Amino acid sequence: MCGIAGLFDLRESRNIDQDLLESMTRSLVHRGPDGEGYHREPGVGFGHRRLSIIDLEGGHQPIFNEDNSVVVTYNGEIYNFQPIQEELESLGHVFRTRCDTEVIVHAWEEWGAECLHRFNGMFAFAIWDRNRKQLFIARDRIGIKPLYYGTTEDGYLAFGSELKALLIHPRLSRAIRPDAVEEYFAFGYVPDPKTILSNVWKLPPGHCMTIESGKPLPEPRQYWDIDFGVDPVPEATMLSEINERLAESVQRRMIAEVKLGAFLSGGVDSSAVVAHMAGLTDDPTITASISFGDPAYNESSFAKIVADQYKTNHFVRQVDPADYALVDQLADFYDEPFADSSALPTYRVCELAREHVTVALSGDGGDENFIGYRRYRWHAYEEKIRNLLPHGLRKPVFGTLGAIYPKMDWAPKFLRAKSTLQALGRSSMEGYLHSVGIFPDHLRKKLFSDKQKSALQGYEAIEVYRRHAERQPDLKGLPLVQYLDFKTYLPGDILTKVDRASMAHSLEVRVPILDHEYVQWVAGIPAEHKLVGREGKHCFKKALEPLLPDDILYRDKMGFGVPVSSWFRNELKDDIRRVVDSPALLDSGLFDRSVLRELVDSHQSGQSEHSAVLWALLMFNGSMKKLGLGQS
């Protein structure tokens, strides 16, 4: 695992500024503390920070082919690199190392962009091919590893593993994208391919680009997509194959020359990964989890059940739910606005894991694969009602009921029907965004200033979903919202959160449940086997019954959250008031000042629950300061 950075001249072949390239690369030292390397020639420069995992002595980057005409800088792991290397050697390629990086340059030589179809792994890389005069950049299929790129005012393409590397460039515009602001306050993150900055993009998962000097910057090309239901899974072998295929995926991710362990929350997904790891080695698996003093957030007793069952070398650290000391540092980790407050405990569990291992396996992806989130169940219920009534009738009936029904955040759950009524008055995708979003569209319109509304020109965040849905027009119901989550929430929130939190500690995290072959196979399991009644991940849990006790498999799902609602009424009550009056927010011209204050007053009085929105504003303020667009 590493950090990469680079510059490419889009106009001609000017010399690359060595000091600038080194500064960009060294901004990523946390991603690769074990060494650095550079390559420069007219028109192109690559930088690399290394976290040594495989071939500790020989895997230094950038790495070249035999005649030095092809060079790569790379972040990630290619798990099947050994058989690919054997095939390439049989075709006459000569290898100088035994690391997965060198496979990429020879695979590019042999197959060009088609080499991507041969790789199983997580990756983001850039290749310079001097003979073809092409820069080629690519990102893994699921989006586990990030890759940012942007154009500068003086005609260079800058790229890097994190936005902070690009921000080093003095000629990179800091102009904010109005539509990205709209998307951030809908989703809690800026979905790929946009970033908060107008001239910077994230290369989307499963995409690549071939760039040539003197030619317009092309659109990214998609080389892989998940297809739901294309290859139906036979019911007779479904349960056994769920385990067999997951075990294969786990085994692929246990190749390392450094200490390797796993996160263990006590939930189904991390417990499944640990169970398979324990079955693949004679040595005790190293596991890490955090506990909270508040029972509402504490899963440590369940983690202990699994740790005891599989005799893992288990490490636990208690984190005070009032652990808000990291709040001011989050903008440094994430650069652009990121509003998932579970980034705080994720940072802490990565901190603990890194004290004992360099590589950790996680259970991320189980909910997206096997319909595990509660919101999927609610969406299925709402879809049944939507299918009973045409949209022309639903919209006025439920829209009116949703408008007049009081917002009773203080009331028992069964009385809090406003959000459900509002969702039922919308289309399927609009209703789903209403369920997952942090700030409903009608409130975003109140939040934004007249200037921001004018800049949006009617644009709404739902267009993100529509754009993805156009790629798979036949998808309906649960497979559709699963697909949307694979394109937005998974890479934009979950994987971003884990990547930044882990790399802040120079910890590599591998995600076996998101092996692309496993993901595609699981997509062939019909939704009715994944969600049965109120039970999400039903077939996954049934398959795991021989490995895990029912107390783990069939207990209520707990979140990995922090008590931000209480913080904004107590410990952070003065901080959030300062934020809504800060220059970073007010001078941006994006917000209605009176609405900002109204949100704080309403939340702190207990009249309404606005913690998600206030957290999003807090994180937005931090990012604006990070970008040099205001000081509070």
Image (spheres, rainbow, N blue to C red):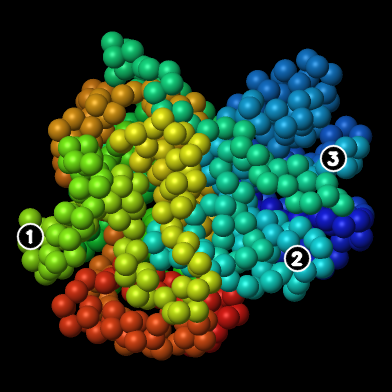
Sort mark 1 into few (<14), some (14-19) or many (20+) by Cα contacts within 10 Å. few
**Left or right: where 555 falls relative to 630:** left
> Of the residues shown, which amino acid type is indicated by label 2?
Thr
Q: Is residue 66 above or below residue 436?
A: above
Q: Is residue 590 above or below residue 427?
A: below
Question: Who's the residue at 39% across and 23% down the image?
Answer: 229
**Left or right: where 220 falls relative to 576:** right
Q: Is residue 436 above or below residue 128?
A: below
Q: Quadrant of residue 243?
A: top left
Q: Earlier in the sequence, mark 3 or mark 1?
A: 3
Q: Position of residue 573 (x, y in %)?
A: 28, 84
Sort mark 3 into few (<14), some (14-19) or many (20+) by Cα contacts within 10 Å. many
Let me know if residue 303 appears in the view: no
Looking at the rendered structure, the secondary structure element under dot 3 is: strand
Q: Position of residue 368 (x, y in %)?
A: 36, 39
Q: Which residue matches tag 1?
A: 415
Q: Nearer the viewer, mark 2 or mark 3?
A: 2
Q: Which residue matches tag 2?
A: 152
Q: Which residue matches tag 3?
A: 129
Question: Who's the residue at 53% across and 52% down the image?
Answer: 192
Looking at the rendered structure, the secondary structure element under dot 1 is: helix
> Of the residues shown, which amino acid type is indicated by label 3?
Asp
